[in-house]
Image (cartoon, helix red, strand yellow):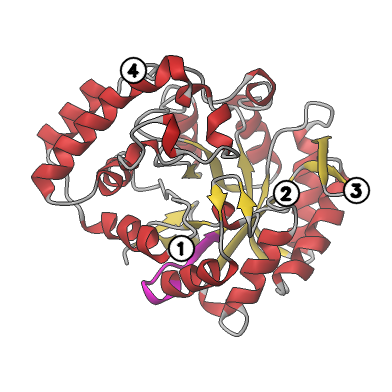
């Protein structure tokens, strides 16, 4: 496994593991998830040299952090554990965003306990809270660093100006936002700011929520309760249009004798050396396939072909519905 840095100091594996698909341990956001297979997947990731694991308080909620904490017990020192806070939770339900200093501290204490660790390596604000100045939130996060409860700070789905303001209060090691061949909105303003400020970038959903793997040929392939049935890009109206990109990814994959998922990840890795994608997985087979992407070498012709098939703004449909879209790029 190759390595990269988030910010000037935090070294991680070039690909991390997004643990979100394991969240429900049953009917999760992406269909059924087996606890035993989820734990085996984390074990296999560690065997393959993955050091970077991403979770969040809201995944489950709470269940995902507990699962990861159980899996890493006894080998925590080798790993970089990232988790996120920022939602208001009541009786296991999300009721909005809350990045008040009080909630920052409450969330941190809970995550430390569930993960079974003394220090969180990378602590992200999950979504920007428009009611709380980012300076106030980051100030509270910085107090946790001073107390040794957190090592590095991150933001998720923050806009360029918010990122600059946050970084002025305390160094931000990483920004996590959606980025893939079919979601390139961060390229215009976000990535340049990250590069200028020396902030790492962590793409979530780097495989287009599974679309870019080539394993989904129609909406009928999705379970009835699957979250993606609500994704506008997966809608009946947009599905066929977006499959055109998948066809090109499959063509490039054929030339390299690898999977479409590996091509999509190799494309991301080739954009900049401060980018560390976190493909999500709940099964060893998909994990092993994704992690092999670090060894794929795309040619300039490959990049040109993929760029032409996936221009910025070329995907049919927004990445979220109206409510969720209102919470990003603040």
Residue 322, quarter of the rendered image: top right
Res. 11 mark: 1
Q: Which residues are magenta?
A: 46-53
Residue wearing tag 2: 58
Q: Along the line of sight, which residue is nearer the eye, 330 or 205?
A: 205
Going from N to C along the chain, the mark reached first, 1 or 4, is 1
Q: Residue at x 44, y 50 (%)?
A: 279
Residue wearing tag 4: 241
Distance from Cα at disc 1 to Cα at disc 4 = 39 Å
Q: Is residue 122 left or right of residue 310?
A: right
Q: Is residue 277 above or below residue 249?
A: below
Residue wearing tag 3: 102
Distance from Cα at disc 2 to Cα at disc 4 = 33 Å
Q: Nearer the viewer, mark 3 or mark 2?
A: 2
Query: Is residue 104 something that shows in the picture?
Result: yes
Q: Is residue 36 above or below residue 220?
A: below
Secondary element at image label 1: strand
């Amino acid at each position: 496994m190759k390595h990269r840095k988030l910010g000037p100091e935090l070294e991680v594996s070039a690909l991390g593991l997004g643990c979100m698909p394991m969240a429900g341990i049953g009917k999760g956001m992406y269909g059924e998830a087996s606890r035993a297979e989820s734990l085996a997947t984390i074990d296999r990731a560690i065997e393959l040299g993955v050091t970077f694991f991403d979770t969040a308080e809201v995944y489950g909620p709470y269940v995902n952090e507990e699962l990861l904490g159980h899996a890493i017990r006894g080998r925590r020192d080798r790993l970089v554990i990232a988790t996120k806070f920022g939602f208001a939770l009541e009786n296991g339900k999300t009721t909005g965003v809350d990045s008040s200093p009080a909630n920052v501290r409450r969330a941190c204490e809970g995550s430390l306990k569930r993960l079974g660790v003394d220090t969180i390596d990378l602590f992200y604000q999950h979504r920007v809270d428009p009611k709380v100045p980012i300076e106030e939130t980051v100030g509270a996060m910085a107090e946790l660093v001073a107390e040794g409860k957190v090592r590095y700070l991150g933001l998720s789905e923050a806009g360029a100006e918010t990122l600059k303001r946050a970084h002025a209060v305390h160094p931000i090691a990483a920004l996590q936002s959606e980025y893939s061949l079919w979601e390139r909105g961060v390229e215009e303003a976000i990535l340049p700011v990250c590069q200028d400020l020396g902030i790492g970038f962590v793409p979530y959903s780097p495989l287009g929520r599974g679309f870019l793997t080539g394993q989904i040929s129609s909406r009928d392939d999705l379970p009835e309760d699957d979250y993606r049935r609500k994704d506008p890009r997966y809608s009946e109206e947009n599905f066929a249009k977006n499959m055109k990109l998948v066809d090109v990814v499959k063509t490039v994959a054929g030339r390299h004798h690898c999977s479409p998922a590996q091509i999509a990840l190799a494309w991301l890795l080739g954009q900049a050396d401060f980018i560390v994608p976190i493909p999500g997985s709940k099964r060893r087979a998909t994990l092993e396939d994704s992690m092999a992407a670090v060894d794929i070498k795309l040619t300039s012709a490959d990049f040109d072909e993929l760029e032409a098939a996936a221009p910025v703004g070329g995907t049919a449909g927004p990445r979220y519905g109206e409510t969720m879209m209102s919470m990003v790029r603040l």
